[in-house]
Image (spheres, rainbow, N blue to C red):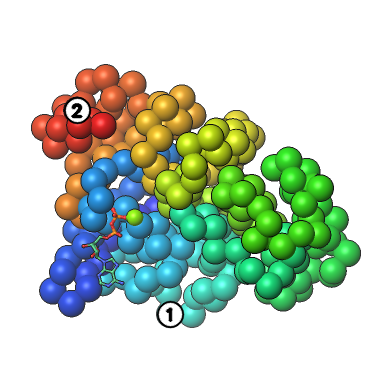
Amino acid sequence: MIKVENLKKQYGDNVVLKDISLNVKKGEAISVIGPSGSGKSTFLRCINGLEELSDGHICVDEFDLADKNLNIDKFREKVGMVFQNFNLFPHLTVLQNITLAPVTLKKETKSEAVKLGKELLEKVGLLDKADVYPSSLSGGQKQRVAIARALAMKPEALLFDEPTSALDPEMVGEVLKVMKDLAKEGMTMIVVTHEMGFAREVCDRVIFMADGEIVEQGKPEEVFLNPKNERTQNFLKVL
Ligand code: ADP
Ligand code: MG
């Protein structure tokens, strides 16, 4: 469903992604691990169409990012993104945060968007917070709203960039639970995370990135219990 071929991304002389290829099947949950600065966020941003590619191709279903006639808004609708710092709109209520894009970008009617928005809030356990502003929510609640907001666009896949890294430890579990449920329902997901337990338990495949390359990948038990590459071994050792 997502096909990355020989992706290269550089900022000036700094080559951040060096020839990355990856195929993601529909329904697959993949975790991406690796040291800070290895290009994980840049990789997700490329898949979401937020960065211009220096070389290579990224296709999601029949849409090719390199296609000059591509409707980038349509492309982004297919791939939702959840950020470390939630990025909720502070001046909108929780429900308004969720319905804004479906109404303005997808031209859904307000009542359709509100109906789905409430269903999604119920799914993430926050229906009672529909009319409050983000500032009154805990970090874990904000992140669950951010996930509901991404789902409101009915994406084919969701990208998560360290979704629990900004959270107090006691709130990590409630967000991982929502993500685990999504994976079980068959959502296609790529998750950059330091939560090795989540990667091991929930994901079909683990990818280890270092210095802008995919150094190693495999089933979680292979990568965690028997890493083949020395860099993977050293990374897992210091965790
Ligand atoms: P990670 O998410 O694995 O920590 P990043 O993708 O954030 O890594 O960063 C990889 C490298 O790309 C870093 O060296 C970073 O400085 C550089 N980089 C990221 N975004 C930009 C940007 N917008 N402009 C210039 N350099 C960037
Ligand atoms: Mg990052």
Q: Which residue is mark 2?
A: 237
**Residue projecting furthest to the front:** 136
Rendering quarter of residue 149: bottom right
Task: Please name which of the two marks, 2 or 1, marks the residue nearer to the observer.
Answer: 2
Q: Amino acid at mark 1?
A: Lys
Q: Quadrant of the C terminus?
A: top left
Q: Which residue is mark 1?
A: 68
| Front in this rendered view, residue 238 or 21 | 238
Whole-Å distance between the Cαs marked 2 and 1?
A: 45 Å
Label 1 CB less than 8 angstroms from ligand 1: no
Q: Residue at x 42, y 46 (%)?
A: 165
Q: Residue at x 28, y 64 (%)?
A: 56
**Residue projecting furthest to the right:** 111
First of labels 2, 1 by sequence position = 1
Residue 186 visible in the picture: no
Measuring from the top left, give residue 75's x and y in whole percent: 53, 67
SS of the residue at dot 2?
helix
